[in-house]
Image (cartoon, rainbow, N blue to C red):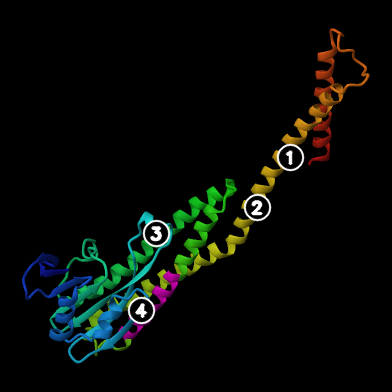
Amino acid sequence: MIRRYHITDGKLVENGAEDAPVLVYANPDEAERRHLIEDLKIDEHTLASALDPDELARLEFEADHVAVIFKRPRNYSSADNFLFKVWSYGLFLFPNRIVVVQAEDVLLFNTRHFAKLKSPLDVALRLLNRTISHFVDHLKGINLIAGELEQKINTSMENRYLLNMFTLEKSLVYYLYGINSNGVVIDKLKTNAARAGITPEHLEFVEDLAIENNQCYRQAEILSGILSSLMDARASIVSNNLNVLIKTLNIITILIMVPTFVVSAFSMNVAMPFDSQHPLAFWGVMAVATLSMLAFLTYWRRKRW
């Protein structure tokens, strides 16, 4: 699928014009891939890298364009079960055009980042900025989810919430990998600014991108460290909750067994202190059973078991 955009009054407006300066290919079919490779001269391996979620972010200089493979967080859905994934997309910068290739059909330009645009290069740099902000937003969401799971772990005896925490920690490993990989690309853009067609005005924006990406990486690193260091403690909480439950069940079991033993003793077919015809025989047995249970409880509390 292809979307075409023009820059009008500093904003991107979608239309179907063939000469649109901004082209977005979402999961291109075979015909669209042939067009990108044969007509736009995009390297086939680089095009495949833009659609490969496991590909490293990188910057390449071709004869008539600059290719940027960048990592971005995949939009989360409940079916992912707390696993936040990282995907790739490609930016191909031509002198008067930008081509974006991605594996999913997601709207890229529906945020506040895309305003006061003047050229396709502006669109490319704002898209990189939007990707970094997307990572930051996801990190905030992961932090909130981790807080809610922590509260549930404190009162739960199941491994389900603990496994969800492990999944979040695994997601942060992917995020650290993706953010760090993006940082290498941004640094390379700074170093090769002239070759990439970046003006001094745009270079200042690229430097801001490097700072924001570094802050995003530090935030992900701190969050990953916190989750990792607290996982053992949270596992101990689940184990302790289970021990408390077993202790409670043991108390209940013993409380039932003590009066049961008393009643069973008086039910034996032998001579006992109470005759079965005695008017207070039943209540006497019940009193002895109750007193034995209270005596056990008193002993338990004094021992602080």
State the CA–CA distance, disc 3 to disc 4.
21 Å
* Front disc: 1 or 2: 1
User: How many neighbours does mark 3 have within 10 angstroms: few (below 14), some (14-19), or many (20 or more)?
Assistant: few
Residue 250, numbered label: 1
The amino acid at mark 4 is Glu
Q: CA distance from mark 2 to mark 4?
A: 40 Å
Amino acid type, label 3: Asp
For the N terminus, give its image quadrant.
Answer: bottom left
Q: At which x and y percent is residue 81?
A: 42, 57
Using the rendered view, name the quadrant where residue 183 is placed.
bottom left
Name the mark on residue 55: 4
Amino acid at dot 2: Ser
Please tell me whether residue 244 belongs to the stretch shown in magenta. no
Query: Residue 185: percent from the left, percent from the top?
Result: 34, 81
Q: Earlier in the sequence, mark 3 or mark 2?
A: 3
Q: In terms of sequence position, does the residue under pointer 3 or pointer 1 come before the other? A: 3
- Which residue of the protein is positioned furthest toward the front in this rendering? 269
Answer with mark 1 or mark 2, whichever residue precedes in sequence. 2
Outermost residue toward the top in this view = 279
Magenta-span inclusion, residue 187? yes
Whether residues under marks 1 and 2 lie with C-beta atoms below 8 angstroms apart, the answer is: no
Rounded to the nearest angstrom, the CA distance separating label 3 from label 1 is: 40 Å
Q: Which residue is mark 2?
A: 239
